[in-house]
Image (tube, rainbow, N blue to C red):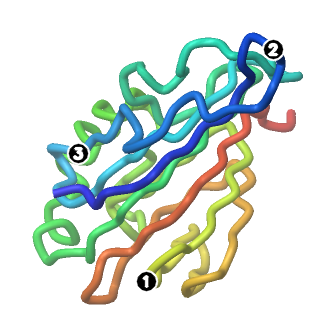
Amino acid sequence: MPKSMQRIVTGHDSEGKSVVTHEGMPPTVVELQHAPGTVFYELWNTQSTPASVDNGDDPTRTPLMLPPPKNGTRVRVVEIPPDTEELLKHGAARIKEAFKEVGDAHASTVTDESPHPLMHRTESIDFGFVLEGEIVLVLDREERLLKQGDVVIQRGTNHAWANRSTKPCRMAFILVDGEFAK
């Protein structure tokens, strides 16, 4: 069951005064069927740069998508459960289905030689903040343990998140659309 979360969005009233326009749980909260315990809380996204600053509709009332929109951003919180023996032994065989659930089947880069079954790569700059718990950033050639309060700046590299603890890890992500250097 997803944890409750308060999301407060501000805007302006008809007189131009600041007000709260949305309050409560994010409207898009998805637990992945093919990665049980992994929950995405979609907080906000922008469709362009510079972003339109207006009282428009809530942009998160759409199907779940891993990458940010072209020239846009995506802000989310993700709960990552502890790795299981099942995931580590057989996860690679079904991981493409999990990436399909987040709208980006091509992000998965897992092969028989991959260091973790959740290896993936996106054409974006991702800022990841560990809010609760701990997580291991798995790269092609090395790993780093991240604990509560730590931040990672992911620059389009092949990676996975391995939760080797006994408790879920909660991370906040800001994804910014990018282009791979040529």
Query: Is residue 23 found left or right of 18 in the rendered image?
Result: left
Position of 95 with respect to 21 (left or right) is left
Q: Residue furthest front?
A: 15
Against 131, residue 181 (above or below) is above
- CB under 8 Å between discs 1 and 3: no
Picture disc at residue 15:
2
Comes first in the chain, label 2 or label 3: 2
Residue 120: percent from the left, percent from the top?
48, 50
Label 1 crowding class (10 Å Cα cut-off): few <14, some 14-19, many 20+? some
Residue shown at 36%/62% (left/top)?
A: 79
Which residue position holds label 1?
133
Q: Disc 1 to disc 3, how far (Cα)?
A: 20 Å
Residue under circle 3?
32
Label located before the other in sequence (1 or 3): 3
Q: Mark 3 falls on what kind of element? A: loop
Ranked by sequence position, the earlier of labels 2 and 1 is 2
Q: Position of residue 44 (x, y in %)?
A: 58, 35
> Split into 4 quadrants, where in the image is the C terminus?
top right
Q: Residue at x 85, y 37 (%)?
A: 181
Kindly state the secondary structure of the residue where label 2 is placed.
loop
Q: What residue type is disc 1 on?
A: Gly
Residue 8 position by quadrant? top right
